[in-house]
């Protein structure tokens, strides 16, 4: 998940009222405010004339700290949680230990690819809203570095996925592609959940057909498991969207998490979403244990 925990969530109505009051009190737009706080005007010491704005954003960071920032830009919490869920599902379905490890590696790389793409797409928006923990937006991580990491991640992900078999690998790569499309399409309106549901619905196929060294020995996943996976994807979308409700409201977005947050408040929505995901995960585990994927 992209936030530090439940303590980061407060009541939606209060957050939205605060955001609207701040916008009303400021004579500048959100973009202007961001520019005002990040730049200043310098003066030539010889001529006394203005030389234009000077950025106070920190420069790119290299070395070990830069690597840590690169991992942070990949949304590591969501990547690890998604990979762990897939790994547990693979183990419960009776896959060999080496195959379970391959699932973990593939899912981790796929999650980082999605996270990097999301932070690149949202770079200007994250800067405009001064969102914390965004090293690409605040200038500590050069976008070119992230694009390079993203390209390397894709080049690693393709052979990892194909190692599971053509059918399984194709299903996972399409799931990642749908996730990438979800970073740019449908996310601002009520249908924001569609790409999440479609992406997660492909994961049982990835697990069911997977085998070591490209041996596709599986069968099609059961319809019930596919539906439960899609429902889980919707739940993950709502859970991750909870921590961006104020920026979404400022931008006029009306995504599914935004609509639900306005209706019942983010604190209650958080509790409901966690309970919902608990039910979905338990159902998937029971169905998998009783008859496989």
Image (tube, grey):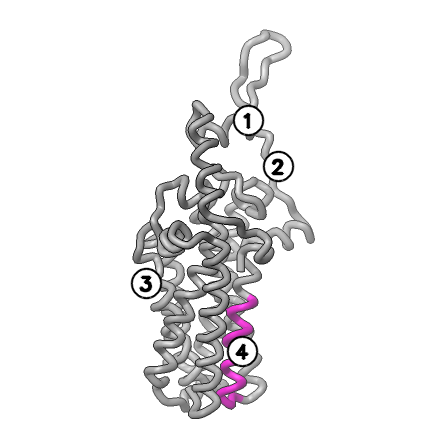
Marks 3, 4: nearer the viewer: 3
Marks 4, 2: nearer the viewer: 4
Disc 1 or 2, which lies upstream in sequence?
1
Query: Marks 1 and 3: in contact by CB < 8 Å?
Result: no
What secondary structure is the magenta-colored segment mainly?
helix
Separation of marks 4 and 2 at Cα, in angstroms: 38 Å
Q: Element at badge 4?
A: helix
Disc 3 or 1, which lies upstream in sequence?
1
Of the pair 203 and 66, the residue shown nearer to us: 203
Of the pair 282 and 263, the residue shown nearer to us: 263
Q: In this view, does 126 lie to the left or right of 141?
A: left
Q: Which mark is residue 39?
A: 1
Separation of marks 1 and 2 at Cα, in angstroms: 11 Å
Q: Element at badge 1?
A: strand
Disc 4 residue crowd, few under 14, some 14–19, many 20+, Cα 10 Å = many
Check if residue 257 falls in the magenta segment. no
Check if residue 92 falls in the magenta segment. yes
Q: Residue 194 carries which label?
A: 3
Q: Residue 87 carries which label?
A: 4
Disc 4 or 1, which lies upstream in sequence?
1
Separation of marks 3 and 1 at Cα, in angstroms: 39 Å
Q: Residue 58 carries which label?
A: 2
- Boundaries of the magenta span: 80-95
Give residue 175's position: percent from left, percent from top.
38, 69
Separation of marks 3 and 2 at Cα, in angstroms: 37 Å
> Residue at horizontal 53%, vertical 22%?
53
């Amino acid at each position: 998940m992209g936030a530090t925990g439940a303590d980061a969530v407060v009541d939606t109505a209060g957050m939205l009222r605060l955001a609207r009051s701040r916008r009303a009190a400021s004579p500048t737009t959100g973009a202007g405010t961001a520019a005002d706080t990040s730049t200043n005007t310098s003066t030539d010491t010889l001529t006394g004339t203005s030389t234009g704005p000077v950025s106070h954003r920190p420069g790119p960071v290299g070395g070990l700290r830069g690597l840590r920032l690169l991992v942070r830009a990949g949304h590591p919490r969501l990547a690890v949680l998604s990979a762990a869920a897939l790994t547990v599902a693979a183990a419960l379905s009776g896959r060999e230990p080496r195959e379970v490890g391959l699932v973990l590696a593939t899912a981790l790389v796929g999650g980082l690819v999605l996270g990097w793409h999301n932070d690149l797409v949202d770079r200007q928006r994250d800067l405009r809203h001064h969102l914390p923990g965004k090293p690409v937006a605040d200038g500590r991580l050069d976008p070119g570095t992230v694009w390079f990491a993203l390209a390397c991640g894709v080049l690693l992900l393709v052979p990892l996925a194909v190692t599971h078999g053509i059918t399984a690998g194709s299903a996972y790569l399409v799931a990642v592609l749908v996730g990438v499309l979800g970073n740019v399409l449908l996310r601002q309106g009520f249908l924001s959940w569609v790409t999440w549901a479609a992406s997660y619905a492909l994961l049982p196929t990835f697990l069911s057909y997977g085998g070591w060294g490209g041996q596709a020995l599986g069968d099609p996943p059961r319809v019930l498991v596919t539906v439960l996976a899609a429902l889980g994807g919707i739940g993950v979308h709502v859970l991750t969207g909870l921590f961006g409700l104020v920026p979404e409201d400022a931008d006029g977005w009306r995504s599914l998490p935004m609509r639900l947050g306005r209706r019942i408040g983010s604190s209650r929505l958080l509790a409901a979403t966690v309970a919902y995901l608990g039910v979905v995960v338990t159902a998937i585990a029971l169905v998998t244990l009783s008859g496989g994927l």
